[in-house]
Image (tube, rainbow, N blue to C red):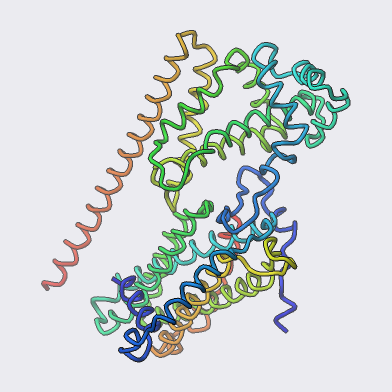
Amino acid sequence: MVMSSFTPLNKSLLRTTQFKCLRRLYHPASNEYVNPTTISPLTYSMDSIQSKILSHSLKEYVPTSGFNEKSILKSINDLGYSSSMMSVIGASNSPSFAHSSPAVLELIKYNLVSKRIELTKDTNDNTTTTLKELLLKRLEMDIPISSQLRGLFAQLATPGKFMFDVSLPELFQLADDMIFFSNEKDHHDMAWYSKRLAVSMAYVTSKMFMIQDTSNNFQMTMDFASDKVDRVMNLGEYYNNVEEYAWFTLMNSINLVKSQFSRM
Amino acid sequence: MLRTSLYNQSQLLSRPFSVLAPLKATVKNGNKSVKAGKHAEAKVPKYEQLSEAQRAYLDRVIRVDQAGELGANYIYAGQIFVLSRKYPHLRPTLNHMRDQEIHHHNTFNALQIKNRVRPSLLTPFWKVGAIAMGMGTAMISPEAAMACTEAVETVIGGHYNAQLRVLTNQFDLEDVSSPENKKGTPQEVKSLIDTIKLFRDQELEHLDTAIKHDSRRAVPYKVITEGIKGICKIAIWSAERI
């Protein structure tokens, strides 16, 4: 009788949340399971051919020639693979005439995902790393490709499927990782969202600042970013103080009214 | 306060009947237990990865239960706020139930942080709605407040049972470390099942308490209970998704 009401777990569960920005998955305790072979948005493992080509091109060619097919092609030739690997690399992205080739989009995706994983690789549960340190570390990771950031931003912010399915979810995932793997306090209510939003905004604005920064070793960007984080945290504190005061005053006045009534 | 009392209770339950039992432990027994410990340590099962659908389901379970316990906590808070002065005899009952709900809420809060689950986006709305529901029914009469409790706990009991059904049936994973790849449930899912079972029993206890306190004598009984049941079902549906 009850058996018929089972809802078998299948893909329809995932379809209910259409927006990938809002879709999140439970993070299981890692020590009970075998290690995953792939890292979530990527469809291949970190020691696959695709990954070798993309990381090689990120290191060798992207800093000079930018995020384009030429960088990938040069890496494919360097590593001695057939040039048809280009279509293998782009296989997980749908082609779009309003955007770059699927392989270039995959290169951008790989750049974001691999750096995000790299950022929190050595952190453990009771870490003393602060949020600011993680943010600055992530900005430093992009110093080698600093001359290509303008093009990268243009690709990421082009409105369309790629922006909603990859750029924005990656940005929020990065903010989430930064908060989870630092000693930052986490929340159960709307503060969960506002903190992630604030960290994402601080990261994006610092990156925008980085594009036109000409100072030595991007010192001005780092100052700007740490100042930005400080201001966000101050704003949070102002809000909390106001809320606490308003709640106290409300309770105070209610109790005052109650006490006057009980005297009668 | 409640946490410590629960802790004591579980300690009491696990304590052997004989007070002298610990003194009787011999060397032989000690060796055995050490051996057993080693054995267990060597055989930590490693399961295959949870599928995306299973992870999405666990995500939902924690989000909706967190929101639900938050709601329950605030409903009782609203009821206590209205009733505690006029009907002091109800105060200990309501406080006891609210303390249990606070414990449930804290448990799910901890799970939400630990497993990086997104809290419900409608949290502020749940808070306001729950307080309004608690205060509104309590203003009608104490019986109406109890009818509200009865309706809420009925829906929650059914909801927890539905979750338990899925959790016990759909989470048989292959244990890759065992030679014949036999199936089993990971420890974290097992402990989630145990938590939900315990909480379901406590919620149903609240249901009994409400009926004992004349919830059936609330004046528009049908209207209150059926209306609140409908609201709860809509709330569960949306807290799972949003």
- Residue B157 is left or right of residue A194, and the answer is right
> Residue at horizontal 68%, vertical 38%?
A165
Q: Looking at the rendering, which quadrant does residue A228 occupy?
A: top left
| Whether residue B78 is situated above or below residue A174 in the rendered picture | below
- Residue B21 is left or right of residue A134, and the answer is left
| Whether residue B89 is situated above or below residue A157 in the rendered picture | below
* Quarter containing the C terminus of chain B: bottom right
Residue B9 point in image, percent of width and height: 35, 80
* Quarter containing the N terminus of chain B: bottom left
In depth, the one of A157 and A255 nearer the eye is: A157
| Whether residue B232 is situated above or below residue A54 in the rendered picture | below
Q: Is residue B107 visible?
A: yes
Most distant residue in the front direction? B27
In depth, the one of B51 and A163 nearer the eye is: B51
- Residue A133 is left or right of residue B46, and the answer is left
Residue A146 point in image, percent of width and height: 57, 15
Residue A192 point in image, percent of width and height: 46, 46
Most distant residue in the left direction? A263
Q: Looking at the rendering, which quadrant does residue A40 occupy?
A: top right
Q: Looking at the rendering, which quadrant does residue A65 occupy?
A: top right
Number of callouts in the render? Answer: 0
Q: Is residue B231 visible?
A: no
Residue B235 point in image, percent of width and height: 55, 64
> Residue at horizontal 78%, vertical 32%?
A49
| Whether residue A182 is situated above or below residue A34 in the rendered picture | above
> Residue at horizontal 70%, vertical 58%?
A13
> Residue at horizontal 72%, vertical 35%?
A161
In depth, the one of A76 and B219 nearer the eye is: A76
